[in-house]
Image (cartoon, rainbow, N blue to C red):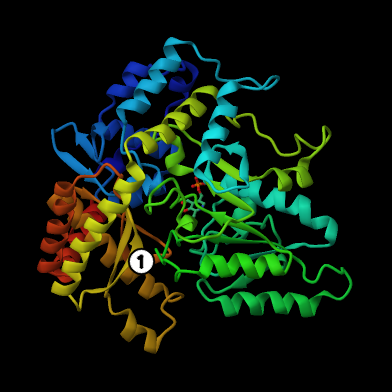
Amino acid sequence: MTALAKIEAPSREDRQNRGLLTLDQSLALDSESAMGLYAAHLNKYMLQVFDILGLAQMDIESAQGAEITLRDGRRILDYSGGFGVLGLGHNHPRIIAAERRCHDLKVLDCIKIAPHKLQGALAYNISRFLPEPLDVSFLAVSGTEANEAAMKICERVQTPKGKTKFLCFKGAFHGKTHGPLSLTTATDVQSGFIMGVPKENVVFATYGDIASVREAIAREKADIGKSGSGNRIIAGIIETIRGTSCHVPDPGFLTEFAQVCRENDILTIFDEVKVGMGRTGKFCAFQHEDVVPDVVTLAKTLGGGKRELGAMVTSQALFDKAYGNKNDCNLHSSSFSGMGETCAVGIETLNVLEDERLIERAARMGEYLRAGLERLREKYPRKIVSLRGKGCFQAIELNFGQQLAEKAIDIRKNPLFVTYETVLIGAMARELYERHGILVHFQPGARDLLHFMPPYIVSEAQIDALVDALDDVLGRGVADATVRFVVKNIKRVLG
Ligand SMILES: Cc1ncc(COP(=O)(O)O)c(C=O)c1O
């Protein structure tokens, strides 16, 4: 019987007696009981997804650096990077020490009626990594909330001019709360929801194509008539490298994008939630170019892998225009905007990046990884179509026959093809995990790409282990992986 079949809802008696789990009991839960609780009280369908990928039964003892240790002693190399959260790796000793220090000092975490010194210090540190005039932060607890803050500050400045629309890119990912969700089409996450920004107020362009940006703006110009501001677009938001498709724009594209927006009184928001904080070999990916946006958003690695922390960073001038008086200064706020210990972790994370030269290391290790993937591409030219990414964000595009299928059907919308691709990519990920103890991930919006997001502290030997594992799995063939995957999942379904 699989663990999923064991799930039972708590009885009425259990509920009345409360019978709370203590922290000791919670930490000691075996994986089967933990899964039961997850299914009954969180999301049993998500658990099924983990189960299909062979991950539901991961009985994790601890995690350190690039490795996760299971209770049976197995060590797993984590190339999922927590989808970008783990730039410093798991449980970086300095981050743990920073938390301990805060505990010893009984640092005040929550204060809403007075300024907190750690908030100011964190915002100062963030500004040190960014070009002028990006000096003023709003602290958030996730990437999507950083983007909410970014959208709102731009709205405050631009709506008095009659502007009502956002420019974004087809296939973008900016988060799942209502505002950023309206601008997110990387995968189908909008169905059944009322958009924060109505559909008619969203203008789309094609990523990496400046002509399409100009055309989108020109369409809005033609549309305008009365407002007098030239076009109705509030701001253009862009992932500086695409998180889903791992598409790196041509050098100069971000600069041109910012310039075209500026010429048309459109503010720019650079979403660095996934690739910022050093992952590409610069603090932010846009810093590979000589360009400065009006607003930049950060999250993920900013929390050092231990805390929920995001930031929207802008200039004093823009902040003043939006919220610059005593009545309006709190128009955008949140109870958890900059808790003390979270800020301490953010401050230490930025110091670790600096002291351990981790941004340079991310560039170096990224090149080493890329070279390994390049060798594989030469060895398997029919299986690996292309390499994507920069620094410690890399992906391989696998050939699952899309090119042939594309000629016959619209594969992105065809449920059969989506299922077929999901099985193949799922099979590859599961093989890497089960045969080689390597965790990788893929995204629903790009089911032909395997993503690799190592922490910047990854070693060459650990990269070699990934490349060897991929070599083995590709050498055996996609068919081999798929058959094992399907057989395991049929067993699962049949119980
Ligand atoms: C580019 C980008 N923006 C925003 C987000 C949303 O961040 P969060 O999941 O912390 O809300 C993500 C998440 O993956 C992302 O990749």
Rendered residue at 84%/56% (across/down): 160
> Of residues 378 and 79, which is closer to you in this image?
378
Q: Residue furthest right?
A: 226
* Residue 52 shows up from this direction: no
Q: Is residue 273 left or right of residue 454?
A: right
Q: In percent of the image, x 74 and y 75: which residue is there?
A: 220
Question: Can the viewer see residue 336?
Answer: yes
Amino acid type, mark 1:
Arg
Coordinates of residue 477 in the picture (x, y in percent): 14, 70
Q: Residue furthest bottom?
A: 407
x, y percent for residue 155: 74, 53
Q: Nearer the viewer, residue 90 or 261?
A: 261
Along the line of sight, the residue nearer the viewer: 429 or 272:
272
Q: Which residue is mark 1?
A: 447
Q: Residue 395, position in %: x, y?
A: 31, 62
Q: Where is the N terminus found, in terms of image quarters? A: top left
Residue 416 placement: quadrant: bottom left
Name which residue lies at 82% across and 36% down: 325
Q: Residues within 10 Å of mark 1 (few under 14, many from 20)?
A: many
304 on left or right of 341: left
Residue drawn at x 52%, y 39% as measured from the top left: 128
> Residue 85, how many percent across, how many down?
40, 43
Residue 358, compared with residue 21, is above or below; it is: below
Asked if residue 81 is positioned above or below residue 334 in the image, the reply reads below
Which quarter of the figure has residue 40?
top left
**13 horizontally vs 261: left or right:** left
State whether residue 462 is above or below residue 11.
below
